[in-house]
Image: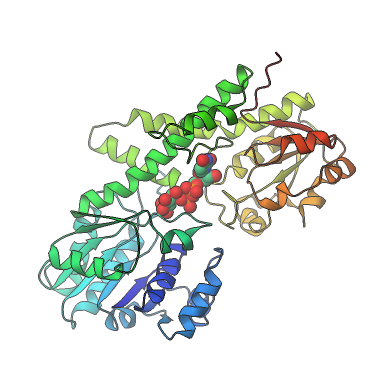
Amino acid sequence: MRAAILGAGYVGACTAAVLAEQGHQVIVADPDKERVMALAAGRAPVYEPGLDDALAMARASGRLSATTSTADAVDASDVTLLCVGTPPKPDGSQDLKFLKAASQQVGQALRSKPWHCVIVKSTVLPGTTEDVVAREVAKASGLQAGEGFGVAVNPEFLREGSALSDARAPDRIVVGQLDEASGKAAWALWEGLPGKRLTTDLATAELIKVASNAFLAAKVGLANDVANVAAAVGVDAAKVMEGVGLDARIGPQFLRFGAGFGGSCFPKDVRALVSLGKRVKKPSRILAAVLEANDAQPLEAVRLAREALGTLKGKRIALLGLAFKPDTDDVRETRALPLWQALTKAGATVICFDPRASENFRKLAPKAKLAASALDALEGADCAIVQAEWSEFRALAPAEFKRRMRRPLVVDARRALDAARLRGGGVEYRAIGLGERQV
Ligand code: UGA
């Protein structure tokens, strides 16, 4: 098929790479010239492991191109996938301005085209595709949804950091269809991929996406709650979660407790569902509590540091890991920000480091002091807090903590490091969820 992809973020770029691998002809449109130039040269417009190579291959195969013109992309295609952002507004609801604008542009381009299917990959609340996308396309094109053009919802379940492998080997593919022709066009894109398949109506597919993120966020939130209790009663939550995860009904994934969840999806989608619940007068008390608990969770790491140091005032703290999770440069909703704020407010000097996300973190916290390496951040520190489980932090030798730090104290807010190895090397190790009952 010939597919236009609107939006060159990590969803658009990974989708483009995989569609091209599947033999489709792909043209990506984005108003950002730099992103388009990167794609046109077969380079990744965002940092995502493996994406550079995949896009270079796609480019070399002649099946990938990029443009700043939505009209040109739509004109050269049979289907258009909307992969634009739906960022949160201050009240938690989704800002649909990019989606609206893209829909209008698609509509204009469809005026002179035969039947074309518009597929929504952006995460939206139930009703949005019909009420906003289909309506705007219809208005701008003068065509009717279901007649002049098709509409489908094809949510993405990619995780940043492993987006490409997730896109190549999805657990499941969900297509919400306005009518059979729309569903057929959407399914034709993914014929070659594995994964369970589910066809629904538009609103159901939309809700499957946000509900999945809400479930996973709540699972992490529950793991954090249990971890805090475990530590308080002297039990190691890592073992508890290992046991809990053995229950096939629960499963071992998303039980990693720590400083809380961040990223562009969990906080935003949970908030969006909470705000939808309010709007339809079915308030989600559970999800509201998940958000509240998640806001408090980074403070557990601050508490551990304070407990060990007596006071944070005048102390030098190395904050390792600024991205919202490892293997990404994305700092959206990163727990490093509330950590940095709380530590700074308590009078500590915070030296920050991340292998990829330092520059992005500076945009969030312009006053943040950034070190050039993890080792530099440790220099003279009274405590190191690990906020993201980058493998390079795990590889740090205990001797480096001892040699460089004023006090070799590690607070592991992600249970990322090897406690026995560090302690064996003379490092003080404390961690969220680590209760050590003396028996
Ligand atoms: C999440 C979902 O996992 C994807 O399925 C979905 O497609 C994506 O959102 C989206 O809506 O676009 P992502 O935000 O990239 O993916 O990252 P996750 O790996 O899910 O992690 C989210 C946050 O939860 C991170 O801050 C991570 O550190 C935290 N987390 C995750 C935990 O604290 N514990 C865990 O066990 C798992």
* Image spot of residue 113 (x, y percent): 19, 82
Residue at far right of view: 403
* 317 lies left or right of 246: right
Q: Nearer the viewer, residue 260 or 106?
A: 260
Image height of 380 relative to 150, above or below: above
Task: Identify the residue at horizontal 63%, vertical 56% (top origin).
Answer: 357
Q: Quadrant of residue 348?
A: top right
Asked whether residue 376 appears in the rendered view, the answer is yes
Numbered disc total: 0
* 158 lies left or right of 326: left
Task: Identify the residue at horizontal 69%, vertical 50% (top origin).
Answer: 367
* 87 lies left or right of 160: left
Task: Identify the residue at horizontal 73%, vertical 35% (top origin).
Answer: 419
Q: Which of 73 and 17 is in front in this view?
A: 17
Image height of 318 relative to 109, above or below: above
* Image spot of residue 265 (x, y percent): 44, 49
* Image spot of residue 290 (x, y percent): 43, 32
Quadrant where the C terminus lies?
Answer: top right
Quadrant where the N terminus lies?
Answer: bottom left
Asked whether residue 92 appears in the rendered view, the answer is no
